[in-house]
Image (cartoon, helix red, strand yellow):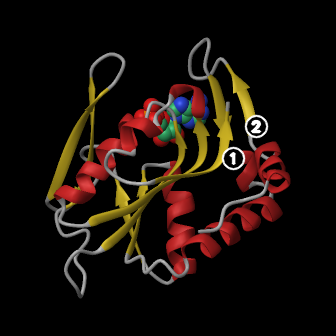
Amino acid sequence: MKVLNNVDKEYLLASIRDVKDFPKPGIVFKDITTLLADAKAYNFLMDHLYARYKDAGIDFVAGIESRGFIFGAALANKLGCAFTPIRKPGKLPYTTISEKYSLEYGVDEIEVHIDAFTCKHSNPKVLLIDDLIATGGTANAAVNLINKAGANCFEACFIVNLKFLNGEALIEKNTPVYSVLEVE
Ligand code: AMP
């Protein structure tokens, strides 16, 4: 499947702003609002994702709250498939199923509606998307949640991968990982 060449990667990476010491000292936050504010870069990225997945037979794009919604909903619409939000606890109004995961200190949880992946055929094909993979904990829980909900995670897609945290190692046991951009 399609990947970007280095020139295109550099172009997109340059549209993402680094914010030092946010939300706490020592973290370099990859701020994708500058990519979204650049219509040409945002369109280029979405065209790339469309080209990569258009023939994959995806039934659902599932986006992780909240930045995964921005890319996921746009991509689902381009692909002509459904979009499913994976949300933080207490946000979805209907019956949910949930998955807990460990943080550096404590635990967190994500949820989907119990009927989120209802489809005309059995074993619906889901593409998971988020803006960034760091330790991989959130996305790994999302893959587990997709499986728990009776669907099949086809691939986990990220706009940015913080390679030095090796988050993809956690997820690759359960599903293939594709990162548009990598930060060493
Ligand atoms: P993790 O579960 O450690 O892979 O964290 C991934 C989630 O945290 C994603 O939803 C990201 O949006 C967010 N995140 C973690 N680190 C950063 C960072 N350096 N810059 C931007 N977002 C981040």
State which tag comes first along the sequence, 1 or 2.
Answer: 2
Which label was assigned to residue 17? Answer: 2
Residue 139 screen position, x and y as percent: 39, 44
Describe residue 72's horizontal placement relative to residue 14 as left or right. Answer: left
Q: Quadrant of the C terminus?
A: top right
Which residue lies at the image location 29% right of the left edge and 43% below the top edge? 141
Q: Position of residue 31 (x, y in %)?
A: 67, 38
The residue depicted at 51 percent of the width and 33 percent of the height is 134
Nearer-the-camera pick, 159 or 66: 159
> Which residue has dot 1 on it?
33
Q: Nearer the viewer, mark 1 or mark 2?
A: 2
Q: Amino acid at mark 1?
A: Thr
Whether residue 21 sits left or right of residue 38 in the image: it is left
Q: What's under tag 2, amino acid-wise?
A: Arg
> Is 75 displayed left or right of 174 in the figure?
right
- Residue 57 to residue 176: above or below: below
The one of 70 and 61 positioned closer to us in this rendering: 61
Marks 1 & 2, CB-CB < 8 Å contact: yes
Left-right relation of 110 to 155: left
As helix, strand or loop, the secondary structure at mark 2 comes to strand
